[in-house]
Image (cartoon, rainbow, N blue to C red):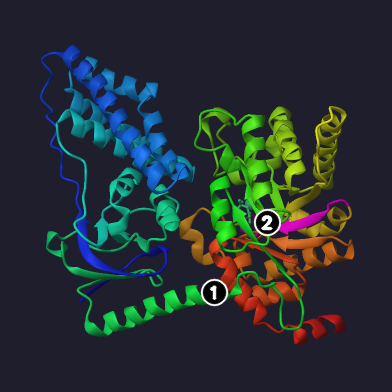
Amino acid sequence: MKEFSGKTVFPGVAFGKLCLLLKPDLGVDTSPAADPDAEKKAFRSAIQTANRELSALFEKTSEEIGEDEAMIVDVQRMMLQDEDYIEAVDAFIRDDLNKAAYAVDRAGRQFFDMFSALDDPYMKARASDIADISRRLTAILLNESTVFSLSGPSVVIADDLTPSDTLTLDKKLIRAFVTRKGSTNSHTAILARILKIPSIVQAGVPLEKAFDGKNAAVDGHRGKLYVEPDEETMLRLEERQKNDEAEEAALDAFRGLPTVTKDGKKVELAANIGSVEDLESALANDAEGIGLFRSEFLYLGRTNYPDEEEQFESYRKVAEAMNGRRVIIRTLDIGADKQAAYLDLEKEENPALGLRAIRLCFERPEMFVTQLRAIYRASAYGKIAVMFPMIASLWELRRCKETAAEVREELVKKGVPVGDVELGIMVETPAAAICADELAREADFFSVGTNDLTQYTLAIDRQNARLERFLDTHHPALRKLLAMIAESAHKAGIWAGICGELAADSQMTKTLLSMGYDELSMSPGFILGMRKRIREMDLSRERAEKRQE
Ligand code: PEP
Ligand code: MG
């Protein structure tokens, strides 16, 4: 047996035959082109073929997985129209007399390096899309196939997997993914989580041909790949798999039950979502509301702003589907790690401390007002609340409320129906946490964004994998701030929740509930497990101690 370790993208246990996904060297011809015009024509025709292939892949992905995931293919279709990329290939053909395949290969590498060097993780992740599209074009020009197929249940190992590699494979046969490269932020990682496929990235596994077809087991819980696992390992993992299945089935019993501790503390367990499609998972996992709708995802992966109508439709659908349960829409939190080219944002030295979220909305009132109008219109179809991100000062909250009131009034004047909309804030800057008492007097609720609150309190970039060991989400400074926030909220008579990742951290549940938090919002898949934990919890001692303080 051989054992290899990496980083977990999605936990779970899987077994299958190893399938080595090695991409053959396409061996481009670097000799000068005799007829540059013919090479240019061949390049144009390869673009058309690639477009057709990607359209077919788009259809397949939409049908098999969903339209949101198919958008990944669309990003590549858009890249095929990128004028800078096309011009770079044309220039290599024209100026250096490269054959089309070599010109595409060179341009692909040039753009790959350019994107890889960018700081923004989203743009960095696009480097693999560039490599993917260039390889597709090169293969078309050389008449080579880029299609991989699996012959049975497989543990796929590769140097790296591009989204289109992943989407082309037969999902029914993929048991697990293991890659030598890759980040937990990549589209492939996102797909693995959506498809619930155990997967490991950055695994120190050599890509030996001899591995192909060997029996393998993946323990996604511990980030382990076992090649030719011994009997003891197999027995242990089979046991773990059975336990996982039994645990998941047992959670069914917690559907429809109230989330309440043994001593009677009631908690609202809500879901974090990023799109209308995520609703399915929120409902399937019995979410008691939507605690965070990251509305900025409506603005990403596209070429222009979503208009009021499109946004209204999305918000209305979510409000209707939740059927009277509260849906908290966070206004646009774009900037920093979430970028879109059409926003034309200036490059900043410190984007996390820069023009993002509410600051950008104040700079672009038309964008902010359009979103608020869409939200207020949708509020007639369910129970909608609005939450403003990255608030640091009282004047910001006041300005948000003024704008919201103006939008509401204008709609009412026109006879457009609107509902009662709570206006709350995300507490995710240390300034907001420290001034929580003042803010609580003017906000309808607080939801703590522990992801950003941790990064700003500890002065640690949450995107930097090398700082992971310093990013202590249980740091005493954070606990003090969390206690202050809940206390200030309750003194002012408003409720307080948590929508950062800490809400799903089982080691903190008792602490957070003892502090008095009223709501926890998390990825839908964690809800039923959390309900079980809370229902088995007794906080009478902690609550008595708190009363004595
Ligand atoms: C947070 O900061 O905790 C949060 C929920 O917002 P995001 O992760 O989208 O910044
Ligand atoms: Mg945040």
Label 1 residue SS = helix
- Residue 291 image label: 2
Q: Quick one: 516 or 373, which is closer to the camera?
A: 373
Q: Position of residue 192 (x, y in %)?
A: 40, 56
Asked whether the residues under the numbered discs 1 and 2 touch, taking CB atoms below 8 Å apart as contact, a structural biologist would say no
Q: Quick one: 347 or 59, which is closer to the camera?
A: 59
Label 2 residue SS = strand
Q: Amino acid at mark 1?
A: Leu
Looking at the image, residue 186 lies above or below residue 372: below
Q: Is residue 448 magenta?
A: yes
Mark 1 lies within 8 Å of ligand 1 (Cβ measured): no
- Residue at horizontal 28 percent and vertical 52 percent from the top: 170
The answer to which image quadrant residue 244 occupies is bottom left
Q: Quadrant of the N terminus?
A: bottom left
Residue behind mark 1: 251
Q: Tell me: 144 left or right of 285.
A: left
Q: Residues within 10 Å of mark 2 (few under 14, many from 20)?
A: many
Q: Amino acid at mark 2?
A: Gly
Instruction: Give the mark nearest the N terminus, 1 or 2.
Output: 1
Q: Is residue 408 visible?
A: yes
Q: Is residue 117 visible?
A: no
Q: Tell me: 134 left or right of 353.
A: left
- Residue at horizontal 73 percent and vertical 54 percent from the top: 324
Q: Position of residue 491 (x, y in %)?
A: 89, 65
Looking at the image, residue 91 lies above or below residue 533: above
- Residue at horizontal 77 percent and vertical 62 percent from the top: 496
Q: Is residue 280 magenta?
A: no
User: Which residues fall within the magenta stretch?
Assistant: 442-456
Q: Residues within 10 Å of mark 1 (few under 14, many from 20)?
A: some
Mark 1 and mark 2: span between their CA atoms?
21 Å
